[in-house]
């Protein structure tokens, strides 16, 4: 396995037009942390005197913290500096994550497949670097050559910047890098980057669209499918 500090050499560009890399989202896709984020947000706002119900949850999935905070502050009217609220939510999330987060169904087999076949892989998340490093530390061995955090790009999801950064770091082509996402904004980011996207919805529904592959679980994902979505594009 490679560490997150190691950059995989650029994939071979000659001889074929096949799969070059897999770019995997973290929260709700690789690990089951979406519930932790919601608990962190909901518990804090309850302490502020503004209980949140499930109707608010769909607005808090898959995007950058800045968008989530703008929404929550807007609907509750809580008077708090967004920077301070970011610190509080991240701190509460880290407390909840202390014992580790379970992998999503099928994630362990997917990671084993990527490692076994030496397929370059990167973790691309809207979460901040501190959170990503904590998740990967708890995860142990993994095939990720590197990770891209939401606070390391000028624009995070739903903009294509995080995925374009990962593609460039691999020296690859967007159409040969498969993005795996669970949230609509992440799917939007991957498609805007020009990558084939496999969507596995967790909390928020994802609508079918031309060129978009929808699965109900990572358990349905195998190497043949990864290769086939690239072959359909090139």
Image (spheres, grey):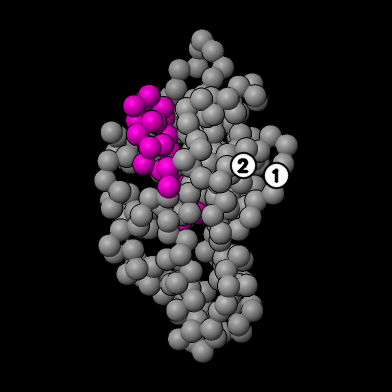
- Residue at x-position 48% and y-position 49%: 29
Q: Please determine whether, in this image, residue 92 is positioned above or below residue 24.
A: below
* Quadrant (top left, top right, bottom left, bottom right) of the N terminus: top left
Q: Please determine whether, in this image, residue 45 is positioned above or below residue 229.
A: below
- Residue at x-position 53% and y-position 83%: 51
Q: What element carries label 1?
A: loop
Magenta segment includes 12: no
Disc 2 to disc 1: CB gap under 8 Å: yes
The label number, if any, that marks residue 151 in the structure image:
none
Mark 1: few/some/many CA within 10 Å (<14, 14-19, 20+): few
Q: Give the range drawn in magenta.
A: 105-129
Give how far apart the Cα atoms at labels 2 and 1 are: 7 Å
The answer to whether one can see residue 157 in this image is no
Q: Is mark 2 on a helix, strand or loop?
A: strand
The answer to whether one can see residue 40 in this image is yes
Q: Badge 1 is on which residue?
A: 208
Magenta segment includes 127: yes
* Quadrant (top left, top right, bottom left, bottom right) of the C terminus: top right
Q: Please determine whether, in this image, residue 137 is positioned above or below residue 38.
A: above
Q: In which quarter of the image is residue 116?
A: top left
The label number, if any, that marks residue 214 in the structure image:
2
Q: Quadrant of residue 211?
A: top right
Query: Residue at the right extreme?
Result: 210
């Amino acid at each position: 396995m490679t560490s997150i500090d190691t950059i995989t050499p650029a994939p071979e560009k000659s001889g074929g037009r096949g799969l070059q890399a897999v770019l995997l989202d973290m929260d709700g896709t690789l690990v089951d942390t979406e519930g932790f984020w919601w608990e962190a947000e909901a518990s804090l706002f309850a302490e502020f005197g503004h209980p949140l119900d499930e109707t608010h949850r769909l607005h808090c999935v898959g995007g950058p913290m800045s968008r989530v905070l703008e929404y929550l502050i807007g609907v509750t009217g809580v008077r708090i500096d967004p920077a301070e609220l970011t610190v509080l939510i991240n701190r509460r999330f880290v407390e909840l994550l202390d014992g580790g987060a379970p992998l999503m169904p099928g994630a362990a087999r997917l990671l084993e497949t990527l490692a076994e076949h030496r397929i370059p892989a990167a973790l691309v998340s809207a979460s901040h670097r501190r959170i990503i490093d904590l998740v990967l530390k708890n995860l142990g061995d993994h095939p990720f050559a590197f990770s891209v955090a939401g606070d390391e790009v000028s624009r995070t999801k739903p903009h294509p910047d995080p995925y374009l950064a990962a593609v460039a770091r691999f020296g690859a082509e967007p159409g040969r890098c498969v993005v795996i996402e669970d949230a609509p904004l992440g799917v939007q980011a991957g498609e805007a980057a020009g990558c084939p996207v496999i969507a596995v919805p967790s909390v928020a529904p994802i609508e079918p669209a031309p060129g978009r592959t929808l699965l109900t679980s990572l358990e349905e994902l195998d190497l043949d499918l990864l290769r086939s979505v690239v072959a359909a594009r090139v």
